[in-house]
Image (cartoon, rainbow, N blue to C red):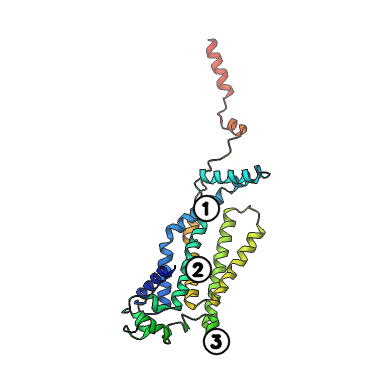
Amino acid sequence: MLDPIKNLIGWLLALFYRVPPHNLGIAIILMTITVMAAMLPLTAKQVRSMVAMQKLQPEIKRIQQLYKDDKQKQSEEIMKFYKENQINPLSGCLPLLVQMPIYISLYGTLKDIPNHVRDHSTRLYVDLCGSSTVTAAQCSKSPAKALTFLGMNMRWSLFEARKHDATFMSLLPYGLLVAFVIATGVVQTRQTMARQKRQNPDAPVNPQMQTMMRIMPLLNLMTAFFPVGVALYWGARNVWLIAQQQFVLNRFYADSAPVSKAAAPSTPSAVEAAKPRSNPNTSKKKQQRRKR
C-alpha cells in the first residue's frame, strides 16, 4: 500500500544523491527540507487554528462552565462556537498524520533501497549495487555497499551497529545522533511551553499538559531502534520545526487577538461612561437665552 510513497522517496534520494559530495545522509537532509517546505501550507493552517483556539479559550471556558451539568449540550455549543469562528480543532493533527506514512515508508525504503530506486542508471543505484546492469533482486541478495554518513551506516540502527562492531568509537556517532534528536525535541517542547506562557501569562499551569510536554521529547529515544537514515530525517525535521517556531509561529502569535463573534455585550456602566456629559454652565446660558 505504501509502495508509491517508497518509490517517491527512492526517486528523491536518487535525485539529491547527485549533489556533491554524493552522500546519502546529505540526500536525506535535502529530502527532509523538501518535504517540510511542501507541508508549509498545511502547517500554516494548523498554526492559524492553534492561535485562534488559544485566543478564544476564555469564551470556550465560559461555555464549559455554563453547561457543566449537561455534557452533550456543552459539546454541541462548543462545536457551534468553533463553526461560527471557522475553527477546525482537528487541523492540528494533520501534519503529524501526514508525517507518519513518510516515516514508515522511509524505513522500508532504507531496508530495501535497490527495489525503490527505479532508475538503475542513477549514481545512487550504481554506488549501492556496483553496476547499473545488476538487477534489484541480485543487488538485494548480495551484500550491498555500505553508504555511510559521518561514519554511520545509513541502513543500521544503533543496536544493529552494536552487533556488527562493538567498539566505543565506532558506536559513538550513532549515540551522538540519538542524543541530538532527543536534544532538539527538548528545545522544541520548551519553545512551545514558553510561547504558551507568553500568550497567557496569567493562565494556571495544567499539570497533565506539563507532564505530557516533558514526556514527549523522550519519544525521540525511539530513534535508537530505527535506521540512521530515519533518525537523521527525524533530527532534521526537529531542527526545521525549531526554526519554524522561532521565525513563523512567533509572528502569528504576535498578532493581535481576533475578536470573537460571541463577545460579551458592553455593561451599562461602560455605555454610560462613554456618553458625553453636558456642561452645567452651558445649560444655564441656554436657559437665559430662551427667557430673553
**Residue 236: % across, % down:** 47, 71
- Residue 36 relative to residue 261: left or right: left
Please tell me which residue lies in front, 280 or 80.
80
Residue in the image at 40% along x and 62% along y: 38
Q: Are marks 3 and 1 in contact (CB under 8 Å)?
A: no
Residue in the image at 58% along x and 32% along y: 271
Q: Is residue 182 above or below residue 193?
A: below
Q: Could you tell me which secondary element the residue under label 1 belongs to?
A: helix
* Disc 3 target residue: 163
* Disc 2 target residue: 238
> Which amino acid type corresponds to the residue marked 1 in the rendered image?
Val
Tell me if I can see residue 236 in this picture: no
Please tell me which residue lies in front, 102 or 193.
102
Q: Is residue 285 above or below residue 163?
A: above
* Disc 1 target residue: 51
Q: Could you tell me which secondary element the residue under label 2 belongs to?
A: helix
Q: Between marks 1 and 2, how big is the CA–CA gap?
A: 21 Å
Residue in the image at 41% along x and 76% along y: 26
**First in sequence: mark 3 or mark 1?**
1
Q: Are marks 2 and 3 in contact (CB under 8 Å)?
A: no
Q: Residues within 10 Å of mark 2 (few under 14, many from 20)?
A: many
Please tell me which residue lies in front, 254 or 239.
239
**Residue 172: % across, % down:** 54, 84
